[in-house]
Image (tube, rainbow, N blue to C red):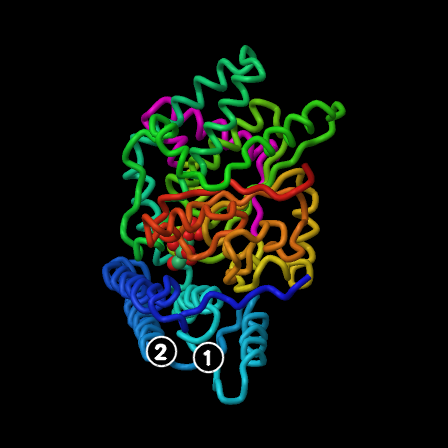
Amino acid sequence: MAAPPASLSGRDEGSFAYLTIKDRIPQILTKAIDTLHRHKNEFFEKHGEKGTEAEKKAISLLSKLRNELQTDKPIIPFVEKFVDTDIWNQYLEYQQSLLNENDGKPRWFYSPWLYVECYMYRRIHEAIIQSPPIDDFDVFKESKDQNFFESRESIIALCTHLQEVVTAIEDLDENQLKDEFFRLLQISLWGNKCDLSLSGGDTSSQKTNIINSLEELKPLILVNDMEHLWSLLTNCKKTREKASITRVDIVLDNSGFELVTDLVLADFLLSSQLATEIHFYGKTIPWFVSDTTIHDFNWLIEQMKESDDKCMSKCGAAWETYINMGRWVYQDHIFWTLPHEFCVMSQVAPDLYAELQKAHLILFKGDLNYRKLTGDRKWEFTVPFHQALNGFHPAPLCGIRTLKAEIQVGLRPGQAEQYMASEPNWLTTGKYGVLQFDGPL
Ligand code: F6P
Ligand code: MG
């Protein structure tokens, strides 16, 4: 097989990668600094002078980081000991080894975009862990929670819908079940519009009832493999022996509204017996502003449970029961917050790869996961998804993302050109989406 093409990079002036590094990332850093500053009193009340000192230290480390980035300084190794420090520093050496003598050192606007963007979030984490006693502070927590609160009306509508479906599930025939499955998959897809990194950390919540918009949004799904997912899961259900399992793994993306849509889908998969067990994967450290950590996951379920809306609290209670029964399993792994493409997972994180192999289907949510699935490379639009995965095939899988980066594979000839002609920014606004399957048919 031919070697994959070059990585997307800030080297390409005017590209989305370039603009992200130039504008969006500094904006996110400034917001993080501002958030620390606004929590000054809280740190003091909790930890006294030590809290104030820590806040100042974290701010100065983040300001230094912003300066390194804006002046395109060389990428420096991590100094604070953490579980993944050695892997990160080895990766920097690897990036160095890819350069020619005259290229100098890996730099922000020169190295692969995927690497430097992940590196930036890992450096934010380093600044925080270097600043005890506020070393467990999540600079993005507030924005994630705000996204959840602002989406309240849509969450209620979604939970009400789910409760109606679950109550009537025994009476639904095959076609009705299928329609429902497709509906909830699409809701989970459009839930991915609500990430907080594209907006530079600004609020991006779901204010309208998404269920009513699905028909209108359907033409914006550029690759729609929902039928494959349905065949796969109904097949598992039919051939499943008593007491054996069908496991669906969901590699989560953003907390807030998107996470609710994923949990609603997961609930339906169990209620309809399309699956018997769901495994969720989240991030071990705050990541790309809105990505889900275990704290966000637990917090959201608790909020749902305690809600004064009956349907929301019913969902929250049911979800807690699933967790207690072990039918929903939350797992994390440092691999998800490393800069590596997924095609090297079997070497870098063989335990995680082996875990994913146990799934009957893996759903990869969001844009960043799609970038890592395809290596964040300059693939032709018509290259088959299977090829762009570059050997990453732990189990049948599906990328579910709204397009927020200049990468897309598996399109029909002429399809990309058609969008390009009318909307030059079609790849990066989050307006379009894909539900893209890879696996035996
Ligand atoms: O900041 C760039 C980026 O990686 C975009 O590709 C995307 O806008 C965002 O961050 C992450 O999106 P998602 O939450 O869907 O992974
Ligand atoms: Mg995200």
Q: Residue at x 44, y 27 (%)?
A: 315
* Residue labelled with disc 1: 76
Please indicate whether residue 337 sits to the left or right of residue 439 in the image.
left
Q: Nearer the viewer, residue 362 or 150?
A: 362
Amino acid of disc 2: Glu
Q: Residue at x 52, y 27 (%)?
A: 181
Q: Are marks 2 and 1 in contact (CB under 8 Å)?
A: yes
Residue at mark 2: C-beta within 8 A of ligand 1: no
Q: Nearer the viewer, residue 440 or 401?
A: 440
Please indicate whether residue 344 sits to the left or right of residue 182 in the image.
right
User: What x and y, as percent, mark residue 8?
Assistant: 46, 65
Note whether 123 is above or below 142 in the view shown.
Answer: below
Amino acid of disc 1: Ile
Q: Residue furthest right?
A: 241
Q: Earlier in the sequence, mark 2 or mark 1?
A: 2
User: What x and y, as percent, mark residue 405?
Assistant: 42, 56
Find the distance from the CA under tag 2 to the CA under tag 1.
10 Å
